[in-house]
Image (cartoon, rainbow, N blue to C red):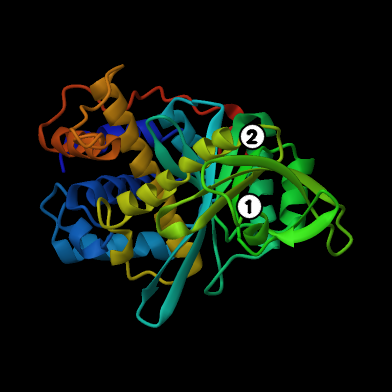
């Protein structure tokens, strides 16, 4: 890690993070250290410090950062969006990632921003249990989003079969948030005066099919008319995606296809990039702080890729996939920049965070 790179990043973040000079320097050390060492493990990050201080001393400094620093919820949102260049409207992806630290379950509900080039975690909730999230937890996360952004910023909310339910769908429709969410084959719908499950309704489905059906009201919630796109995928499994706005089945399925990018984001955060699962932190507040730093690191990597590539797009191989992903392109560029003694900062020191997204301002 280059001393100048550390100083440049510290000057950039000073106006946007409510920390003293020493704590902010430690934050920047962790942020650049996890990129340089390709891990969030504090022992490895301590070895990346560009000074004569003993590794054990630096390691203790990093530990104290997580012991004593408490930043406001969603403090990183404004920095992340500013690094991305505020590319609204965007797709949002909602998904859950989980792993174990010893016998402790780490379960994180993540709301991520997806654009043509970027995939970055924006907000998240540390779930105090294993398994699926509840409707109340999803609604609370979306309300946090709506406290900073208008519903018009959402081009489409994408989610898998785990994120269904009458109350959840009703909330999204009332907030005018468009969505494309995969349904379970056993979901009961009403069409042409009959109630039957999607498996029976689409038993003869072979190509792409679009149709409209009603989700019968449950638990005091009214009936909800939705538009569906359906097709068979490998193994004969049925893929059915629901959306509240009129669209062809093919269009709904094309939108839902982008949901896979959040799986790519989790891989970038873990085995293909920053190895988030290497952490030994188990306390929810400390883990949330680490994920926030990881989100800024991923946004910084995305920005580096955009600056390097400009309007170009990574070359594609014969199989149709990019020879190097946007994340890996930016990842390699930031690591090179940190080692080469940069003449210019990777991020402009006059980074502008919109007032509404500043820490403590809603």
Q: Residue at x 41, y 59 (%)?
A: 235
Task: Return the x and y of residue 202 as percentages of the image width and height.
Answer: 62, 53
> Which quadrant is home to the C terminus?
top right
State the mark number for residue 70: none
Sequence-first disc among 1 and 2: 1
Element carrying mark 2: loop
Element carrying mark 1: helix
The residue lying furthest to the top in this view is 311
Task: Return the x and y of residue 268 as percentages of the image width and height.
Answer: 31, 49
Q: Would residue 301 be seen by someone viewing this image from the given angle?
A: yes
State the mark number for residue 141: 1
Q: Residue at x 79, y 42 (%)?
A: 174
Q: Label 2: which residue?
A: 149
Q: In the figure, 51 relative to 311: above or below?
A: below
Q: Residue at x 18, y 66 (%)?
A: 56
**Left or right, 176 with reference to 36:** right
């Amino acid at each position: 890690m280059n001393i100048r790179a550390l100083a440049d990043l510290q000057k950039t973040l000073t106006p946007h993070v409510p920390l003293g000079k020493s704590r902010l320097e430690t934050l920047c050390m962790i942020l650049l250290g996890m990129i340089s060492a390709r891990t969030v493990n504090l022992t490895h990050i301590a070895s990346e410090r560009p000074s004569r201080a003993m590794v054990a001393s630096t390691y203790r400094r990093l530990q104290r950062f997580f012991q004593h620093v408490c930043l406001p919820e969603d403090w990183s949102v404004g920095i992340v969006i500013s690094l991305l260049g505020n590319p609204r409207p965007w797709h949002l992806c909602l998904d859950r990632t989980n792993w174990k630290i010893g016998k402790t379950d780490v379960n994180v509900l993540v709301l991520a921003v997806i654009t043509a080039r970027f995939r970055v975690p924006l907000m998240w909730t540390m779930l105090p249990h294993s398994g699926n999230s509840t409707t109340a937890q999803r609604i609370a996360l979306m309300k946090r989003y709506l406290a900073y952004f208008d519903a018009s910023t959402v081009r489409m909310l994408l989610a898998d079969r785990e994120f269904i339910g009458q109350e959840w769908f009703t909330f999204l429709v009332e907030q005018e948030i468009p969505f494309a969410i995969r349904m379970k084959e056993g979901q009961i719908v009403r069409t042409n005066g009959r109630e039957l499950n999607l498996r029976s309704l689409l038993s003869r489905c072979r190509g792409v099919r679009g149709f409209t059906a009603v989700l019968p009201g449950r638990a005091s919630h009214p009936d909800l008319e939705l538009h569906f796109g359906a097709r068979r995928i490998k193994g004969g499994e049925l893929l059915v995606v629901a959306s509240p706005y009129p669209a062809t089945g093919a269009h709904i399925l094309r939108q839902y296809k982008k949901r896979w990018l959040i799986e790519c984001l989790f891989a970038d955060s873990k085995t293909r990039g920053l190895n988030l699962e290497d952490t030994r932190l188990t306390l929810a507040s400390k883990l949330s702080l680490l994920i926030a730093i990881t989100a800024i690191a991923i946004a910084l990597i995305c920005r580096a890729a955009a600056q390097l590539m400009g309007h170009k797009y990574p070359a594609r191989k014969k199989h149709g996939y990019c020879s190097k992903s946007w994340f890996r392109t930016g990842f390699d560029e930031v690591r090179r920049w940190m080692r080469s003694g940069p003449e210019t900062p990777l991020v402009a020191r006059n980074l502008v965070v919109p007032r509404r997204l500043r820490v403590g301002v809603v």
